[in-house]
Amino acid sequence: MLAYAADTIRGTAMTPARARRRTPLMTAALYLLLTAGLAAAAWDIRTTVRAPGHGLNYLQLAWSLLLVAYPVSMLARSARHMSTLIILSATLAGVGVNAWNAAQSPGDWVNYFLAALLFLLLLAMLLASRWARTRRAMMPHTAMMPHTAR
């Protein structure tokens, strides 16, 4: 009984988010992304303070803060579900920023392209998430259970 209890405690202490190990290259990339995101957030805060009546500044600030939240959540080893929500929210904010820019300057095709690209990325992530959830639901319950004794 003690061995079973010890194994149960060990299994719950090592959640999938904790069990993953990150390579030094991945950690360096996350710190680089964090630094770039903080610089963008500082710039967007400055822009928002200088022109507080412009709505796009607030949307760009939200986008940069969401881009900062992703490396923070990965470095803090938060749950995978939270990282997915951050990525989806950041992509949606990016669609909003580029759609706003496209509406302000209709002749600039780059804004249309970026808005469409981010929208397609958002759609692909949502469809992949739905597909994975459906696939998991269709798996037999016994296949998801770990095999303890043979």
Image (cartoon, helix red, strand yellow):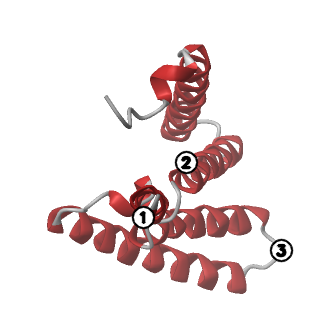
Residue on which disc 1 sits = 6
Marked residue nearer the N-terminal end (1 or 2)? 1
Q: Would you say the residues marked 1 and 2 are in contact, meaning their CB atoms lie under 8 Å apart?
A: no
Question: In the image, what residue type sits under mark 1?
Answer: Ala
Classify 75 as above or below 115: below
Q: Which mark is residue 68?
A: none
Percent of width and height locating residue 112: 57, 34
Viewer-side label of 2, 3: 2
Q: Residue furthest right?
A: 53
On screen, residue 84 versus residue 61, left or right, reads left
Question: In the image, what residue type sits under mark 2?
Answer: Thr
Quadrant assignment, res 10: bottom left
**CA–CA distance between discs 3 and 1?**
59 Å
Marked residue nearer the N-terminal end (3 or 1)? 1
**CA–CA distance between discs 1 and 2?**
32 Å
* The C terminus sits in image quarter: top left
Disc 1 packing (10 Å; few <14; some 14–19; many ≥20): few
Classify 91 as above or below 56: above
Which of these two is toward me, 109 or 57?
57
On screen, residue 103 versus residue 113, left or right, reads right
Percent of width and height locating residue 30: 32, 67
Disc 2 packing (10 Å; few <14; some 14–19; many ≥20): some
Quadrant assignment, res 63: bottom right
Residue on which disc 2 sits = 84
On screen, residue 88 versus residue 20, left or right, reads right
Residue drawn at (60%, 85%) of the image: 46
Which of these two is toward me, 123 or 19?
19
**CA–CA distance between discs 2 and 3?**
32 Å
